[in-house]
Image: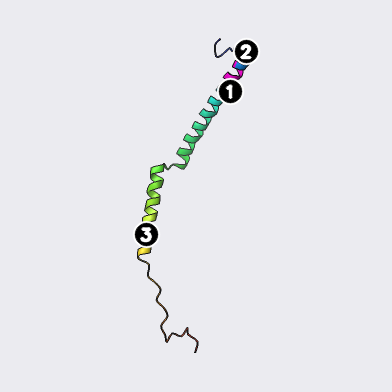
């Protein structure tokens, strides 16, 4: 029998064909939604990785330039008498 007109006596084949068609339609809808999201949100994995690496490099550079806070001097006004 053809796919458009399943065997009416054999309901299991009709259910299989209906399920396959439903899955195909759902898969197509998910692909279309994914494409729309790629356009909408716009960054791919390579761009995200590059941005993360750039941020890590900036943090390392900032940490290297950080000064330690010196201990207060002995005759500091902060010290109670």
Q: Earlier in the sequence, mark 3 or mark 1?
A: 1
Task: Pick whichever, 37 or 22, lies toward us.
Answer: 22
Q: Residues within 10 Å of mark 2 (few under 14, many from 20)?
A: few
Mark 1–mark 2 Cα distance, whole angstroms, equals 15 Å
Secondary structure category for the residue under label 3: helix
Q: Do tag 1 and tag 2 residues touch (Cβ < 8 Å)?
A: no
Q: Residues within 10 Å of mark 3 (few under 14, many from 20)?
A: few
Q: Is residue 71 above or below residue 42?
A: below
Query: Which residue was labeled with disc 3?
Result: 60
Q: Residue furthest bottom?
A: 81
Secondary structure category for the residue under label 2: loop
Query: Which residue was labeled with disc 2?
Result: 10
Query: Which residue was labeled with disc 1?
Result: 19
Q: Which residues are magenta?
A: 13-17
Residue at 55 percent across and 28 percent down: it is 26
Q: Is residue 9 left or right of residue 27?
A: right
Task: Pick whichever, 50 or 1, lies toward us.
Answer: 1
């Amino acid at each position: 029998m053809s796919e458009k007109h399943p065997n009416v006596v054999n309901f299991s084949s009709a259910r299989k064909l209906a399920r396959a068609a439903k899955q195909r339609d759902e898969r197509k809808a998910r692909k279309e939604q994914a494409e729309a999201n790629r356009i909408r949100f716009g960054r791919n994995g390579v761009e995200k990785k590059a941005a993360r690496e750039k941020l890590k490099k900036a943090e390392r550079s900032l940490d290297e330039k950080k000064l330690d806070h010196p201990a207060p001097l002995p005759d500091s006004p902060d010290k109670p008498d």
